[in-house]
Image (tube, coloured by chain):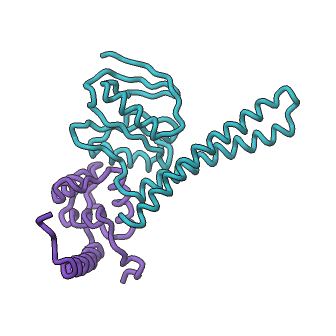
Amino acid sequence: MKHKVVRRFFIDFEAEEAWLNQMAAKGLHLAQYAFPTYFFEQGQPGEYTYRLELLEHMPSHPESQVYIEFLEDTGVECVATHFRWAFFRKPTSEGPFQLFTDAALKIQHYKRLIALFAIIGGANLLIGLFNLGHQPGPYRWISLLNIGLAAFIGYFGLRYGSRLQSLRKQQQITE
Amino acid sequence: MPESSERGALTEAVFYILLALHTPLHGYGIMQFIKEISKGRVDLGPGTLYGAITTLVEKGWIQPLPGAGRKKEYEITMEGKQMVQWELERLQELVTHGQEITGGLDHEA
């Protein structure tokens, strides 16, 4: 079986999901992931649909285990996990595959992402500001790097926030 | 008696899950049942189904059946059946008024 290895980094999981599905459409199916490396196996083009989820707990947590087993019983395969992220796929022959078909759970998922970004972004901002005051001159760039990273993460957090808002608006008129 | 806050409209997913569980089914069985009965219109995502099952068990509207095997089966409770009855009344009212005022489904369209 042919393999392909790609190193790539995504902050926006929806862009990552779209990319994995584009690869799958070309017959390259994600089989393993070890940050920041994606391992693909060659197969039939469009054989699988991929979906990513930031789980509520670590994948080894009993609640996550029960959840993943539940998904597996519906024909979903958990291809890889990384930190709290899970990479799921389902054969396209079994129909369209969405993890969440209701706005409430999509909103819950965005909230989980925003909370994570707030922690990472906030920590970077604090470390950056603290070091800015304490680091000697030549190391200042490290604190600026932290602050820059915080701004970058903050930007993506806001993007998730606006997607969440538009779901909420939709929820006011439809289920 | 449930509190009045529990008398809101049920989501389509919840209503269909409660209907499905008039016969004991496991998760995948519920998905299949709903897809079939709605002729493919309602295709529940497994994440959504899991969330709904968890909430309905907490509320006591459905219950897991005792038994071995990791594929848990669920069935509707008396309280769940009562919820379905109330929802049917509500839906009936919507349909009745809708038909009265618009003259019913426009099959020509």
Query: Residue B104: x, y in percent?
Result: 16, 75
Q: Quadrant of residue A40?
A: top left
The residue depicted at 67 percent of the width and 42 percent of the height is A151
**Total count of labels:** 0
Q: Using the image, determine if residue A41 lies above or below residue B91.
A: above
Residue B68 is at least partly visible in this image: no
The residue depicted at 23 percent of the width and 81 percent of the height is B97
The residue depicted at 41 percent of the width and 27 percent of the height is A32
**In the image shown, does A37 or A21 lie closer to the viewer?**
A21
Query: Residue A65: x, y in percent?
Result: 41, 45
Residue farthest toward the top in the current orientation of the protein: A2
Query: Residue B38: x, y in percent?
Result: 18, 59
Q: Is B82 situated left or right of A116 in this image?
A: left
Screen quadrant of the C terminus of chain B: bottom left
Residue A105 is at least partly visible in this image: yes
Screen quadrant of the N terminus of chain B: bottom left
Q: Using the image, determine if residue A53 lies above or below residue A111.
A: above
Q: Quadrant of residue B19?
A: bottom left
Q: Is B100 situated left or right of A35 in this image?
A: left
Residue farthest toward the front in the current orientation of the protein: B109
Q: Quadrant of residue A76?
A: top left
Query: Residue A5: x, y in percent?
Result: 43, 19
**In the image shown, does B47 or A67 lie closer to the viewer?**
B47
Q: Is A19 situated left or right of A75 in this image?
A: right
Residue farthest toward the left in the current orientation of the protein: B108
The chain painted cyan is A
The residue depicted at 26 percent of the width and 36 percent of the height is A91
| Chain B tint in image | purple
